[in-house]
Image: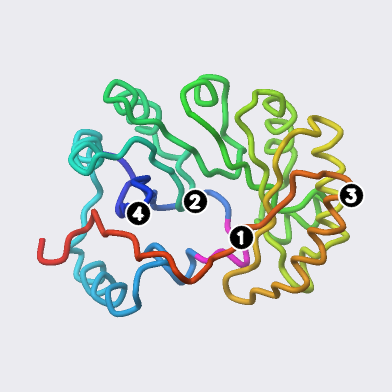
Amino acid sequence: MTNVYHIVQFQSGDAYVLFYGCHWRCSYCVWAFEKWNLCLPNDLKRKLDKLWIKKNIKFLSIEEVVGILKENGVKLAFFGGGEPTIDRELKPLIKRLKKEGIDVWLVTNGELLDKELVDLVKGITFSIKALDDELHKKITGVPNYKALENFKRFAKSGKIVAETVYVKDLVECDEILKIAKFIVSLNPDIRFRIDPLVQNPVYEEVDECIRKVRKILPNTYRIKATGKGKLPNLLYPKLGE
């Protein structure tokens, strides 16, 4: 059985597969208060919450995940959560999906990455919480040396997109500039995504930081929602099941 408990599909046809659980305890983690894809309407999330409380949602087997993605014509599945790499079934699941022509893009803190996993996936969004180790421990409860060593190891793989979260009064632009310099020292062609904190998205500060970081690392950006996109389709769990 995998740690997969929730799957949605976007209008692009890509799916997002959520894995339950994480071995870090990030102080600002959105999943501490939200289990479902953030793009789903609140009334639907409330219904899913009721199913969760009643323990009417089960974790999926490898074949169940494969079946759901195949039935809906998915060709690319983003694996996030949570932390997918703590799932013992992660590699077998990815290998099974590859046999069906479905690629996986992994969203991870990077601490548990290895060469086999990097080789298996189409791409990796590697989240660097902080370069400063004491700040990293304050945020996550763990040191960052293993994650940073893995970033160094795979920086030239051609599969890494770096990511961090701008958190006011915690991870601001001075720290993010340090992360950018670290990335540039390894591979200046890596793309670097700076995400506003969901709970407190100070967009103007983030955009100003991006302008500064681009002077060091040109491929720096954030995802901007237009407000015109259609809501994702809920593939699992289905209401009424």
Q: Secondary structure at mark 2?
A: loop
Instruction: State the residue at coordinates (43%, 43%).
Output: 79
101 or 53, which lies in front? Answer: 101
Q: Which residue is mark 4?
A: 11
- Badges 1 and 2: C-beta atoms under 8 Å apart? yes
Please state the horizontal and vertical placement of residue 60, each as a whole percent of the image: 23, 45
Q: Quadrant of the N terminus?
A: top left
Please state the horizontal and vertical placement of residue 8, each as a whole percent of the image: 32, 54
Q: Which residue is mark 3?
A: 215
- Badges 3 and 2: C-beta atoms under 8 Å apart? no
The amino acid at mark 2 is Cys
Mark 1 Cα-neighbour bin, 10 Å: few <14, some 14–19, many ≥20: some
- Badges 4 and 2: C-beta atoms under 8 Å apart? no
The amino acid at mark 4 is Gln
The amino acid at mark 3 is Lys
Q: Which residue is mark 2?
A: 22
> Mark 1 or 3 closer to N-term?
1
148 or 101, which lies in front? Answer: 101
Name the mark nearer the viewer: 4 or 1: 4
Q: Which residues are magenta?
A: 25-30
Magenta stretch containing residue 29, yes or no?
yes
Q: Which residue is mark 1?
A: 26
Vertically, is 10 above or below 89? below
Q: Secondary structure at mark 4?
A: loop
Please state the horizontal and vertical placement of residue 84, each as a whole percent of the image: 45, 42
> Mark 4 or 1 closer to N-term?
4
Please state the horizontal and vertical placement of residue 43, each as a whole percent of the image: 29, 79
Vertically, is 125 above or below 57? above
CA–CA distance between discs 1 and 3?
29 Å
Name the mark nearer the viewer: 1 or 3: 3
